[in-house]
Amino acid sequence: MRPKAEPLIEGSDSLRARPQLAALVSEAIASWADVQFGLGVVLSALTGAGAEQAVAMFLALTSSAAQLAALRAAAEVKLTREELELFQAVMIAVGAVEKQRNKLAHHIWAHAKELPNAPFAGRSR
């Protein structure tokens, strides 16, 4: 007969106990800053503003929804129909990546002692 399984252990200890996993998670979360910078540069190209100003404006918008709305508004004014279709396809891909990044950043990590190499990112906060 199998002994009763221990409950999941939740919280930051799950990553602390697995430094290699923690490094991968940190790298994935931090790489989102590169995506945001790139989107700010796209805003620069769409508005004709200097890259420094456009990135500063983009990052001053503190919610992702506001950032993407500003970018979409500029694209709708500036781009041709074909360019806008491509832009929208790229933005769908960006949204999918952001969703995965958000799971890494905002879900509660957990592990089970009986499964030492199996992390869980189950519940959202």
Image (cartoon, rainbow, N blue to C red):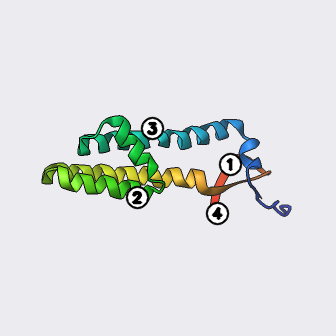
Q: Position of residue 62 (x, y in %)?
A: 48, 54
Residue 114 placement, left or right of 97: right
Residue that badge 1 annotates = 118
Mark in front: 1 vs 4:
4
**Residue situated in front as seen by the camera: 47 or 28:** 47
Q: Amino acid at mark 1?
A: Ala
Label 1 CA crowd tier, 10 Å (few <14, some 14–19, many 20+): few
Of the residues under marks 3 and 4, which one precedes in the sequence? 3
Of the residues under marks 2 and 4, which one precedes in the sequence? 2
Residue that badge 3 annotates = 34
Mark in front: 3 vs 4:
3
Q: Position of residue 17 (x, y in %)?
A: 76, 42
| C-alpha gap between disc 3 and disc 4 | 25 Å
| C-alpha gap between disc 3 and disc 1 | 29 Å
Q: Which residue is rendered at x = 50% and y = 52% of the image?
A: 100
Q: Amino acid at mark 4?
A: Arg
Q: Which residue is rendered at x = 63% and y = 60% of the image?
A: 122
Q: Which residue is rendered at x = 62% and y = 57% of the image?
A: 107
Residue that badge 2 annotates = 66
| C-alpha gap between disc 2 and disc 4 | 22 Å
Q: Position of residue 2 (x, y in %)?
A: 83, 61
Indicate which disc residue 23 carries: none
Mark in front: 3 vs 2:
2
Of the residues under marks 3 and 2, which one precedes in the sequence? 3
Secondary structure at badge 4 equals loop
**Residue situated in front as seen by the camera: 65 or 108:** 65
**Residue situated in front as seen by the camera: 105 or 9:** 105
Q: Amino acid at mark 3?
A: Asp
Mark in front: 3 vs 1:
3
